[in-house]
Amino acid sequence: MAATATLLGLEKKSLREQALAALRTAITSGALEPGRHLVETELSEMLQISRGTLREALRQLQQEGLVSAGTRGRLSVRHLDAKEIRDIYSVRAALESLAARTLCELPDRQHVIGSLRAAIQAMEASTHGTLEERVESDLDFHRTMCRLTGNETLLHSWESLEGSIRMSIMFAGLEKGVRNMSVDRHNDIVAAIETGDATLARNTIREHMDSAAAVLVA
Amino acid sequence: MAATATLLGLEKKSLREQALAALRTAITSGALEPGRHLVETELSEMLQISRGTLREALRQLQQEGLVSAGTRGRLSVRHLDAKEIRDIYSVRAALESLAARTLCELPDRQHVIGSLRAAIQAMEASTHGTLEERVESDLDFHRTMCRLTGNETLLHSWESLEGSIRMSIMFAGLEKGVRNMSVDRHNDIVAAIETGDATLARNTIREHMDSAAAVLVA
DNA sequence: AACACGCTGACTGTAAACAGTCGACCTCTG
DNA sequence: CAGAGGTCGACTGTTTACAGTCAGCGTGTT
């Protein structure tokens, strides 16, 4: 069964895609805890899908860095130590700095600024919600920033990193994680982009990410 | 059959891994031309493997950006236009800039510089070889730079981009591609890293990548 | 007690078969 | 002739079955 968009906007997702989403959530939420050996026969039973379908989903999660291969093809949920979290955030900072600089160089930034402000409003709204919602709206802001560059490769690279980012936040604990997700900091980022000063924007992102990583590994 | 390292250093690779490598090479060399519909039944026959095994390999290639999904799950070899090549090189520059800066910040760089100089010597040797060899040694230099940072996430991100980089070079033609793979430019990069000046190193990489992209899309 | 060997169950890798979707083509009807 | 409907082959998505590897455990030998 292929993914199908129907007239009413309903979308049938393939079992593989559904499994991928479910596993991604289970891993990044900690339900499948770090180091946990992912046994195909168990998971396929839990998810009520065949092992072949599950393998395809697991391959993608492996590529995304959520799953690591041990001896003999055994997969387990990846465990992140402090260095790895810092490394992830370094790469994240590099990608988002590129995004910010790219947005500064756009001839017409108004539409972009509008979208980013909308994302910040969503962040503001989320401060009355759960910690999960706050994390979601924060990541959505950053993803939006990458998407608005129009650089598909950048968005794809960021999205490939997203799982690792989520796991880093989960490792630290949500309460710690949201400590760097304030609306003010994100307003600073948008303001920097609005000035069109690419160096300022890059530095603002860099500081934001350095600070976030420091909190996560403390 | 799992991948197995034996006493003599021989390594049995799984069929999936072998298929992955073969397909990657076929795509990045242009043997499987851009836009070509990848029919599972054909490919599995060509490679003499089952469709299930092939699908796992194709999923990874899709994740690497070498293969794009069309309607109804149909996969085809990705086609890159000039913008996409520039985008790929922007992301590449961001990642390698991070690598260069990270290497500048290492307390003891001598071992690192040695490895980079060895990679340059391999590049020098390759100037007497084929164009393919020159491309290989160039990419090896850059991969080495990322690996030496010790940042696994960075290396993985770079390697996930490698296929797209190779395809960009293939699109332009190898002759054009190697135009920016001179030993001098790479000596400049190493020299910049040797100074420990992160900004200089970053700028050297940035210029190198900007110049490479410009040549590829000209 | 320590070591070697054999067996078994658990697990991964892979192939083959089944099932559903859809485009192309053909036939029929007005 | 144009349009509708049906059929069939090509293809993707998924399941089931087969095969090989290896860790753990039990047994026998020294």
Image (tube, coloured by chain):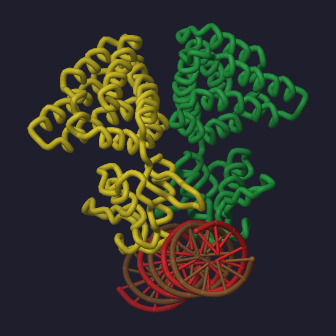
Chain colours: A yellow, B green, C red, D brown
For the N terminus of chain B, the quadrant is bottom right
Q: Residue at image x 30%, y 15%?
A: A192
Using the rendered view, name the quadrant where residue A12 is placed.
bottom left
For the residue pair A105 and C5, the one nearer the viewer reads as C5
Q: Can you give x and y, in whole percent of width and height, for residue A130 in the image?
A: 14, 43
Image-based side of C19 in relation to A71, left or right? left
Compared with A171, B82 (above or below) is above
Q: Can you give x and y, in whole percent of width and height, for residue A139 in the image?
A: 29, 37
Q: Residue at image x 78%, y 18%?
A: B183
Q: Can you give x and y, in whole percent of width and height, for residue B4 in the image?
A: 69, 59
Q: Can residue A80 be seen in this view?
A: yes
For the residue pair A100 and B173, the one nearer the viewer reads as A100
Image-based side of A93 in relation to B132, left or right? left
Image-based side of A63 in relation to B48, left or right? left
Q: Can you give x and y, in whole percent of width and height, for residue A8 in the image?
A: 25, 62
Q: Residue at image x 64%, y 28%?
A: B217
